[in-house]
Amino acid sequence: MAGIQKKHWILSVLTLVVLSASLVNAGFPCNSCCGGGGCFAKKGKPAMPPYDRPFPLGQVSDAFWETQQTNAEAADFIMYDYEFVGKTANLNPMGRDHMTQIARRLPHVPFPIVIEMSEKTNDPAENRELLQIDETRRANVVMWLQKFYADDPTMDPEQIANRVVIAPDFVYQVNSEQAARDFRTATGPNRSRNAYSGSMGRGWGY
């Protein structure tokens, strides 16, 4: 009985050896194929294509995070409507501080300086007045920046003016009435019935 088991073991080993040799001769890559070499390269066949290998950790997702970071940096250069005194072209103290920060960073970034466009109404005459306010705000910001860099020969006044534009804000702003209504919806007594409760009706409001 022991002799029969020994013969079976020998036949199994021989079978594995013959099968391994067949696979190599058929052109299957061995362990050394990683890195562009291996059995394929030795037989004059092309190495494994690079797109069959996984990307380095984080390479795919990093592009999305960098895009979000760039957009956030660009938003730092928006002069919002609430940074001006009422419906005038004069900066309030918060707006003046923001302008100073923008001016110091201006030579080091490619972003435009955006003057937030005033929200339009149904009255054409009032819209024309708001447009004139926006244009005056832009002119004042351009003058402020040109004066800030008056002694810097590397900052061309015309280039400064071309970087200041009037445009809508990048994100949708929520006014105080909308914010109060959303707060009551999220925290009020009927919050568990809110379709956006997000907690399977447990009433957490998020």
Image: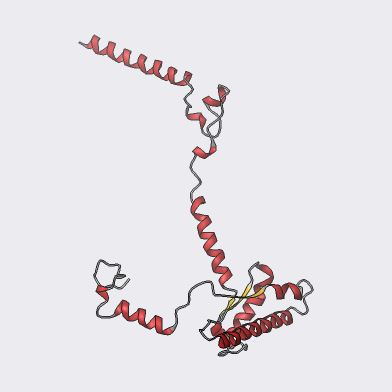
Viewer-closest of 185 and 69:
185
Viewer-closest of 138 and 72:
138
What residue lies at 35% left-to-right and 16% top-to-bottom?
Answer: 13
Could one spot residue 75 in this view of the protein? yes
- Residue 105 location in percent, x, y? 65, 72
Q: Could you tell whether 10 is left or right of 93 in the image?
A: left
For the rendered model, the colour scheme is secondary structure
- Residue 189 location in percent, x, y? 25, 80
- Residue 111 location in percent, x, y? 63, 69
Residue sticking out furthest to the left: 1
Residue 74 in the image: above or below residue 42: below
What residue lies at 77% left-to-right and 75% top-to-bottom?
Answer: 152
Quadrant where the image shows the C terminus: bottom left
Which image quarter: residue 76?
bottom right
- Residue 54 location in percent, x, y? 48, 42
Label total for image? 0
Could one spot residue 96 in this view of the protein? no
Q: Could you tell whether 4 is left or right of 61 in the image?
A: left
Which image quarter: residue 14?
top left
What residue lies at 54% left-to-right and 84% top-to-bottom?
Answer: 82
What residue lies at 50% left-to-right and 45% top-to-bottom?
Answer: 55
Quadrant where the image shows the N terminus: top left
